[in-house]
Image (spheres, coloured by chain):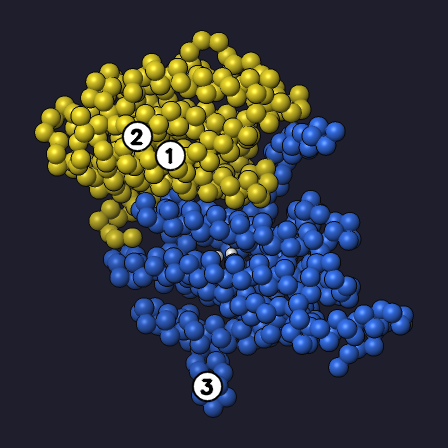
Chain colours: A yellow, B blue
Amino acid sequence: MSIKSAGEITDQAYKQVLAELLYQLGDDDFVLSFRGSEWLGLCPHIEEDVAFSSITQNTMGHATMYYKLLEELGEGTADELAHARPKEERKNAVILEEKNGEGGYMDEPRYDWAFTVVRNYFYEAAKKVRIDSLKQSSYSPLANVAKSIGREQYFHLKHWEVWFTQLLSSTPEAAERMNIQVERVWQDFGDVLSLGPSGEKMAEFELIGDEKTLTEQWLKQVGSAFKAAGAVMPEGAPGAVSGNGREGFHTEDLTQALDTLGEVYNLDRAAAW
Amino acid sequence: MVDATYDNQVDQQKYQQFMEKIEAGGKIEADDWMPDDYRNALIKLISMHGISEIMGALPEKEWTPKAPSLHRKLGIMAKVQDEMGHGQLLLRVAEDLMAPLGKNREDIMEDLLSGRLKFHNVFHMETKTWADAGIVGWLVDGAAIITQTNMLDSSYGPYARALKRICAEEVFHAQHGEAIIMALAEGTDQQKELIQEALNRWWPALLMFFGPASANTTGSSKQDTTIKYKIRKNTNEELRQHFFTKYVPRILSLGLTIPDETIRYDEENETWIYQQPDWNEFKQIISNNGPRSKERLQLRRISHENNAWVREALGARRNISAV
Ligand SMILES: [Fe+2]
Ligand SMILES: [Fe+2]
């Protein structure tokens, strides 16, 4: 099956499930890009500030591509979808909205580099698995977007993989800090790997691979990084102890993110900015 | 033309050759012989420039996630990334100059935190609204283009080459800023008020950006040394005049008012007459007593402390791979 454009969709159920998937993809990138932009100027060194801000910018570009696909489905303009949707309608995974650490980016930011490395590495590994699967999506506009995202995303994954393995296999302090964060992110990462209540339908419509297969691929991918670092991967499947973002459950951290991201836009939604 | 500054014959000769070379338009490279005051002036200038790019990303960062559309978000994210890249490029040029003195990046950062190394006055200022992001891109980067193109022919090759790349990107920054301002200028009354209010606040800082006209104003100015050694061409005042010529008409054409009733172009003397900013305030600002100096330095201090374990971890890895 292959659908060439939004106009070709006749099945309403297909359209709804496709939109659901696009919200997950777009919202994940959108909120994680925000957390990345809060790091600017605070990274361990200037070279990392340059690299991380490049990744963050690309990631915002990816969110924009997914929102544009939603716009084509008649869900509203990309800008509305990014800035004006209430928290309950957001479909990003909860672990991605979590703050980088104590404090705010204007005020005493005690951000945690170990958390950032683990979260971003796990996320980019999951994103790679999804993107590879999406390249065969039955909705060809999405397959095309996946192909162009994949070209940039390869470097993002490599970037975080290097940080991940280096810090895990460096000083005892670094390894300890990393292991604490591995445990923390692991217990919530199931939410990222979840495709939500419509996951089965997504696979049926051949929009993306099935959740179980994708999760196995992810486990294999990160497993090899643990091995390369001589570290131990947690046992069992990752959990979702903080709640399931795919079902619209979110924390106060997302409120702070959305208030910031939409502050100027929401001053006057009708104005051209 | 050549100053007799060396007792030693050999050094005197080297100095003479150095001056002949730069006067003929030649370029000095990192490993070439150079007079101490040339090296010191370059270290001071380039590390200040580099650290200003880095500190300069902070005020814009305050508005980066808040940018009011996806398009603007991407634009300002690209810009702050470029600024960090400029900082990195320039710090590497400064590091090469400092190496023979046994100094490195860590010293630059320590000098920043201790206040020995200053950063540009504009980056000590507050950013209060989205219009500030526009003014910074349009006029601060616009002013930076003027001061930086003035050094494109710098006698120091590595700096001239870095500036060439930087200036090319700065042009995009100014266009990005101008686009923000244009959108606001064509927008609602509220949006128009935002730009006028921002311009009023930024005007004195923009004039200060070029530095005092002479050492008499603030007690120190490096412009004489840098002109003598062909690091730059024009004086601070010439650059400020150039800024007026370029931007005053553009500002007025957007329907904005310049917050200086006395500003006018004197046809006869071909100069802009304007009200001087408060140079005592300038001195205060660049001594880290500006409106946001302490907070922004605190951000860097926190980052430095917070990431100490990461630097240690990277250092340990480097030692392992060196074995
Ligand atoms: Fe710059
Ligand atoms: Fe710039």
Category of crowding for the residue at label 2, using alpha-carbon neighbours closer than 10 angstroms: few (below 14), some (14–19), many (at least 20): many
| Percent coordinates x, y for residue B76 in the rendering | 41, 50
Q: Residue at x 54, y 26 (%)?
A: A164
Residue type, mark 2 in image? Lys
Q: Amino acid at mark 1?
A: Gly
Q: Are marks 2 and 3 in one subunit? A: no
Closer mark to the observer between disc 3 and disc 1: 1
Picture residue at 61% right of the left edge, 19% below the top: A176
Q: Is residue A258 visible?
A: no
Q: Does residue B14 appear left or right of residue B135 in this picture?
A: right
Chain designation of label 3 = B
| Label 2 near ligand 2 (CB < 8 Å) | no
Q: Are marks 1 and 2 in contact (CB under 8 Å)?
A: yes
As drawn, A99 above or below B113: above
For disc 1, the chain is A
- Which residue carries the number 2 mark? A135
Q: Which of disc 2 and disc 1 is earlier in sequence?
A: 2
Depth check, front residue: B126 or B122: B122
Q: Name the secondary structure under disc 1.
A: helix
Pointer 3 residue: B266
**Residue at disc 1, CB closer than 8 Å to ligand 2:** no
Mark 3: amino acid: Asp
Q: Quadrant of the C terminus of chain B?
A: top right
The location of residue B3, given as percent across then percent down, is 79, 77
Relative side of B238 to A10, left or right: right
Tell me if residue A10 can be seen: yes
Residue at (83%, 73%) from the top-left corner?
B13
Residue marked by disc 1: A150
Distance from Cα at disc 2 to Cα at disc 3: 65 Å
- Determine whether A243 is above or below B122 in the image: above
